Amino acid sequence: MSNKWIKTCNKSDVSEEEPYCFAVSAEKNIAIYKLDEEFFCTDDLCTHGNASLSEGFQDEGIIECPFHGGAFNIRTGEPTSYPCINAIRTYSVKIEGDTIMVAYDGE
Amino acid sequence: MEEVVMLATVPERVVIVGGGIASDACAAELRQSGYNGSILMLCGEPWRPYERPPLSKEALDDKGSIEERFFLHPESWYDENAIELRLGVHAAGLDIRQNTVELTTGEKIGFDRLLLATGGTVRKLWIEGGEAPNVHYLRTKDDALSLASALTQGSRIAIIGMGVIGAEIAASARKLGCNVTAIEPETGPMTRALGSQLSNWLAGIHHKHGVQALYGVSVARFVMEDGLVRAVECDDGTLVSCDAVCVGIGIIPETGLANDAGLAVANGIVVDHQNRTSVPSIFSAGDVAELPAFDGADRVRYETYQNAAEQGATAARAMLGQAADNTGPCTFWTNQYDLNIQSAGKVSDEFSIVWRGSMGDDGFVAFFLDGERLVGAVAVNRARDMAVARKLVAAKIDVKPEDLASDVLPLRSLLKALSKN
């Protein structure tokens, strides 16, 4: 399926300290991060446990899972700390005016 | 000193006894730290390392969901990282002069560095009927599957002990529609982990969810019929009829191997701040290890996920001669009903509490202060605050109560002020 740009939140909804959780469907949330005036997006559900990464602690380019201390690189989705070993999926982001658009293919 | 000289400077063979979180974290950290030698993990259970936290939660109320999230890593991860797993094997002996581990089969395995991450076994009720088929204990995957089959809608479940495990089972059992009666000698659930104020609050939550609780009473005996426990008689005379009993009264650290080999053992295998035992080539981590406490005043044994993982990683770095230190605060989490409770550091009635939010709220944080020193924190449904609180507790700082209490002032600003100093 080809990527479709979906509207998520406004730039002002996201801060470097508080990632934004956006529901793309009833089952699926994505997390949107601000980093050095740029925006990034990953799945919200940690690849390790049943935790919401947007509830986690963002330390510059790293998001730390709020439950087990695992962590991911926000830009690449690569795991950076145990017990996370599977990368988190990342999504392309573009800005239209004040709106953050995310390339989401519906899967 | 002689023993230190005997150590191979660059280890080539690491053997890990145990197949839990600490073992797995140790193996992962060895590879992350550039270790290229062999890693052999001896797992007592017939499967590779898995998550224990879901055993008292998802494994009970949603058996189908457990398989995919059950194991720590896919099987291929161990192959890719050249970590050899031996499943269902047990160490029977340890020779600290020959640096060998002997299996129950008689096979001897040599090592340059050894990790003892043998965990613990559940403490059992040594009363008549304590081993009856409808008396459940919870430590392993098999235990969880057996317990899950007993938690059917409408069944009468007696829970003995309302520590973390008992309280989690109570919540899961209510979710499954069981009639739950809890028996706990303390004044409320999880008193040791939460202190009395939060324990009283949690007692109210369990009550609201329909758990009938008998606090301040102990089990006197089981009333048996046809080999099964039909009722629990308490020491105040109360009789609790039941279809099944769940006992959660703690674990006994598996120190036998270390003890027999002559390693220093107290309430667990004694280790230093690098998880090194009294024998320099041998390390210990996880539930079985007794280490210097966070504040250095005491020695402690933690039975938590994060501490096991951190200790396993610490031991790995220390094995390789790299910087390693395990003296972070104790941290844990528990999920009960719609509550996520997380804790860091020291939580006890001897400290004063500063509330951020209040106990009636959907989410709040309790900070524990020893004078002006922040020593611990418990967060309920405030995972993001907890991430900061953990770092504040770890920093061992003095704080102004009004800063912690102010919901207007982001906790992160306290952390930032700290990093500027």
Image (tube, coloured by chain):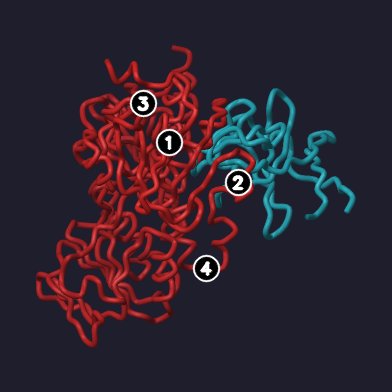
Query: Both on one chain, marks 4 and 1?
Result: yes
Query: Residue A5's quadrant in the figure?
Result: top right
Around disc 1, counting alpha carbons within 10 Å, would you say few (fewer than 14), some (14 to 19), or many (20 or more)? many
Q: Secondary structure at mark 3?
A: loop
Instruction: Give the x, y percent position of residue B140.
Output: 40, 59
Chain A, which colour? cyan
Mark 4 belongs to which amino acid? Lys
Chain B, which colour? red
Q: Is residue B413 above or below residue B212?
A: above
| Mark 3 to mark 1 CA distance (whole Å) | 10 Å
Mark 3 belongs to which amino acid? Gln
Is residue A84 toward the left or the right of residue B347 in the image? right
- Determine which residue is flagged by label 1: B312
Q: In the image, which disc is placed on residue B63?
A: 4
Instruction: Give the x, y percent position of residue B116.
Output: 36, 40
**Quarter of the picture holding the N terminus of chain B:** top left
